[in-house]
Image (cartoon, rainbow, N blue to C red):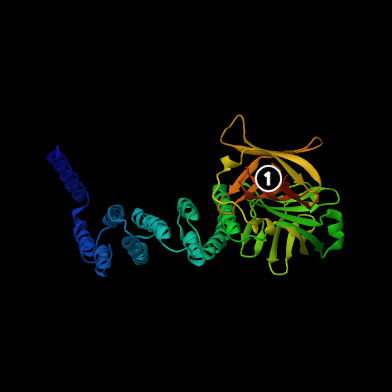
Amino acid sequence: MKKMILTLSLALSSFCAQAYNPALDPAIKNIEACLASSKTLICNEEIKTIVSGLSMDVRGEFAMFLREELKANSTELVIKNLYSKLGDLVSLYEKLDTNDQWSFRAIKTFQDDVSIEFVKVAPIDSSFLVKLYKNQGTIGGRYGLLTTLNAKIAGLSSLTEMESLIRFLEVAKEYSRSIGDESYLYNTAVQMIGTVTVKETAMRPGHEGIFALTFDNAEAAKSLGIDKVVVMESNSRDQLIVNFVASQSRIVKMSFTSAAMLGNTLFSNMDTYNNNQDAANPFFKFDLNRETNTIKGVFSTARYGVMSFHGTLITSNVSVYALETVKGLALEQLMGSYKVKVGNYDMNLVIRKRTEDRTVVEAALFSDNAMISFSKVSLNSSKGVLSLVDYNNERKLTLAIVSMENGPEFRGQFLNALQSKVLEISSK
């Protein structure tokens, strides 16, 4: 059996070697010599001379041969070598064959694919990625770059790389929109920005809270009625939420889901829901001064244009994260019904798996006179903090698990964006 497999393997190898035009032999031997001497595919200038002497069709076959060699020798050294050397070959093909011939398209597509492979092993650098994205010859190449980077997000641990990736994605999504790419590229970049922001916020707390706003345009501000901005983290779908609130009338005028955070700058990242046609097509951007707990920025609407504002923090949940907590818990350990004190009110908190879908956890905070449901329940096990957010991203419980001696003991905050108020909450 082993002899049969070996014979078949040799036959296939011989077939693959003979499948290329004999005129390609000098180029193949050059590549094989580079692999033997330097473990790379392109190690000398001679290959350009050899390729120049080939016919157009044979040059096209050489591009296919390089692709097969990369599949067989996909080491980091080979990928970096090809990335640095292929540019000269692409220029040579363009000069000899022009860019409307299949041979040029073959080497250019291969270069795009090598670029994607290079991204897998290279550090994240926004300037490099922007140039690479714009140099991709096809929409498939641009989408491939996005999906390759998306696969790297889970492993990111450096704030510098996270911020660099967000800078690139901001350029990429607008570039794709400007050249008429399909909307899925824009939407992919938006989702990725939100995902990176979630990782960044987990490493850099202190952004959630309620801020009192003052606008430069007092007349427009009076018409809109907005006097507060509420920043909160939601679930993996909605991610970072920024609500602009008219607290006197208890209305969220503008709710931005999947907002982005780049360092100390927060900004809108996708189309928004709003309750007021005066605020149609809005966007926002503001800087957070973590030392003074103040914000300064702008938002724009179709009716009022760009409006500048500044604000001061009223309250945040930083104190909850500063509590001594029980870490390393699983969400299943927190299921149950608990008596809690919310401000001056006695209430009950229930955490359970949804009846029709046992994989989904939901919660409810209720008394004889009121009930609030929370459909977005998540546990930061490394910090020992439980987060519960309602469906509309208007109410949130941030609960530190301070003890498990007699079951879960909670201390934290209840945030009500509609009223722009926070109440302390604790187990009874």
Which residue sits at x=32%, y=63%? 77
Look at the picture and state if 402 lies above or below 287: above
Dot 1 corresponds to which residue? 389
Tell me, yes or no, if residue 372 can be seen here. no
Q: Please give left or right for residue 82 compared with residue 270 in the image.
A: left
Residue sitting nearer the eye, 66 or 253: 253
- Which residue type carries mark 1? Val
Whole-percent x, y for residue 199 in the image = 56, 56
Element at label 1: strand
Look at the picture and state if 372 lies above or below 84: above
Which residue sits at x=66%, y=46%? 409
Q: How many numbered badges does the structure rendering display?
A: 1
Which residue sits at x=67%, y=39%? 363
Residue sitting nearer the eye, 244 or 363: 363
In the rendered image, the quadrant that contains the C terminus is top right
Whole-percent x, y for residue 371 in the image = 76, 37
Q: Please give left or right for residue 124 compared with residue 249 in the image.
A: left
Residue sitting nearer the eye, 205 or 296: 205
Tell me, yes or no, if residue 1 can be seen here. yes
Whole-percent x, y for residue 13 in the image = 19, 47
In the rendered image, the quadrant that contains the N terminus is top left
Location of residue 24 (image quadrant): bottom left
Farthest residue, direction front: 405
Look at the picture and state if 303 lies above or below 390: below
Location of residue 218 (image quadrant): bottom right
Q: Please give left or right for residue 100 compared with residue 234 in the image.
A: left
Residue sitting nearer the eye, 90 or 207: 207
Q: Residues within 10 Å of mark 1 (few under 14, many from 20)?
A: many
